[in-house]
Image: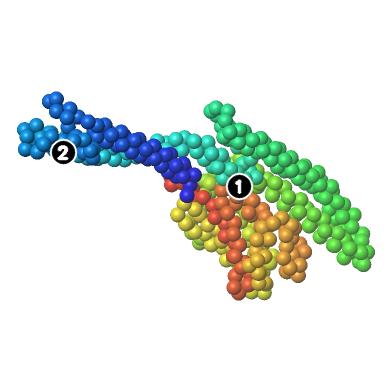
Amino acid sequence: MPVRWRLTLTYGSLFFLAAGILVAINYVVVNQILNQQVLAEGAFVRPAGTEAPTPPPGSGRAIMVSSVNDQIGRYREQVMSWLLSWSLLATAIVGLAGLAAGWFIARRAMTPLLTVTETARKLSGETLHRRISLGGPHDEIKELADTFDSMLERLDRAFDGQRRFVANVSHELRTPLAISRALLQVSLADDALPRPLRPVRDELLAANGRQERLIEGLLLLTQSERELTTREPVDLRDLADRPDLESAPTVGDPVLLERMIANLVDNATKYNDERGLIEVRTATLGDHVALTVENTGPAVAAAQVARLFEPFSRLERDRVGSASGAGLGLSIVRAIARAHGGTAVATPRPEGGLSVTVTLPRARAGLPAG
């Protein structure tokens, strides 16, 4: 049960208990008052339950006393009946008012905590710049929110420093790798290189190419993990360059989304087998759009699928083309999907290969896509 409901029931129960105690006290006091001796026209009237002597029967005074006692008894019963009815009604009204007041107080008390929860739910590596900035009196809840903001500040600095480090190192490595590739291509040309050394030259160029792709992948991964600076209406069908697909309008960075689709297709091509099947589909699912890329290939255990989205993670080393990959393809896909408020999920196909589905928010009606 939510805390708000528990607080409401607690407050309401306290109101019901307090009202019940007051009704009981009031009932006892009034009953005691009505049971006191009453004098009527100078005659002694015996209340019910007393042992006081009464006049001789048959006398006029005795008849009068009996009549007065009967009237007092009926009046007492009527008063107590009314008192009980109105007291129970008042108890119900006070209790319901207590429930309403408890709901309102609990809502006011829980609002700051709901703000903290909502902020925490929206946080990711790309939105650590958000803060709660809770106002109001300096109480325990504000202290909690301020502590949470301080933690976010430290995490934001750490994540930003890590991204800057990866980006700076990647930029610094691109130039020497490009120079090394140019030197290998120029100085070790076929005309000047003996034939036995040409395989070595080819292996050096292939290794250099893998290093360049790794650096490009790191740069793209760092860029895709940041908050988007470009948001445009696009259609995944157009980015996939497949007019036969269903329209799937969304909003985001066209360059990153196009690279995401290219990574999915490249991954499906690289890890295929002799069947060579690659299927691309798009669909609209309510408030979301989906892009699915399926391929044939070696069987993948369901327990290993989650590893595919981790950076530098590969499965079997003997998979076709695994030596040329940096293990960043699906990591970049997931980072781009998350940056656009979506998800990326991989499912192994029973006959071998994978089905990777990216789900993104659908563009609002009226926005042109493409």
Residue 134 placement (x, y as % from top left) = 56, 32
Question: Residue at left 64%, top 54%?
Answer: 333
Residue 114 placement (x, y as % from top left) = 52, 40
Whether pointer 1 and pointer 2 mark residues with C-beta atoms closer than 8 Å, the reply is no
The residue identified by callout 1 is: 339
> Callout 2, which amino acid?
Arg
What is the crowding at mark 2: few (fewer than 14 residues within 10 Å), some, or many (at least 20)? few
Judged left or right of residue 91, residue 339 is right
> Coloring scheme of the render?
rainbow
167 or 104, which is in the foreground?
A: 104
Query: Looking at the rendered structure, which numbered label has been put on residue 64?
Result: none
Question: Residue at left 35%, top 39%?
Answer: 20
Mark toward the viewer: 1 or 2: 2
The residue identified by callout 2 is: 74
Going from N to C along the chain, the mark reached first, 1 or 2, is 2
How many callouts does the rendering have? 2
Q: What element carries label 2?
A: helix
85 or 124, which is in the foreground?
A: 85
- Residue 123 position (above or below residue 55): below
> Callout 1, which amino acid?
Ala
Residue 85 placement (x, y as % from top left) = 24, 40
119 or 288, which is in the foreground?
A: 119
Q: Which quarter of the picture shows residue 33?
A: top left
- Residue 39 position (above or below residue 282): above
Residue 66 placement (x, y as % from top left) = 12, 36
- Real-space CA distance between mark 1 and mark 2, rounded to the nearest whole angstrom: 81 Å
Question: Residue at left 54%, top 52%?
Answer: 360
Q: What element carries label 1?
A: helix
- Residue 221 position (above or below residue 305): above
What is the crowding at mark 1: few (fewer than 14 residues within 10 Å), some, or many (at least 20)? many
Question: Residue at left 23%, top 40%?
Answer: 49
Asked if residue 287 can be seen in this view, the reply is yes
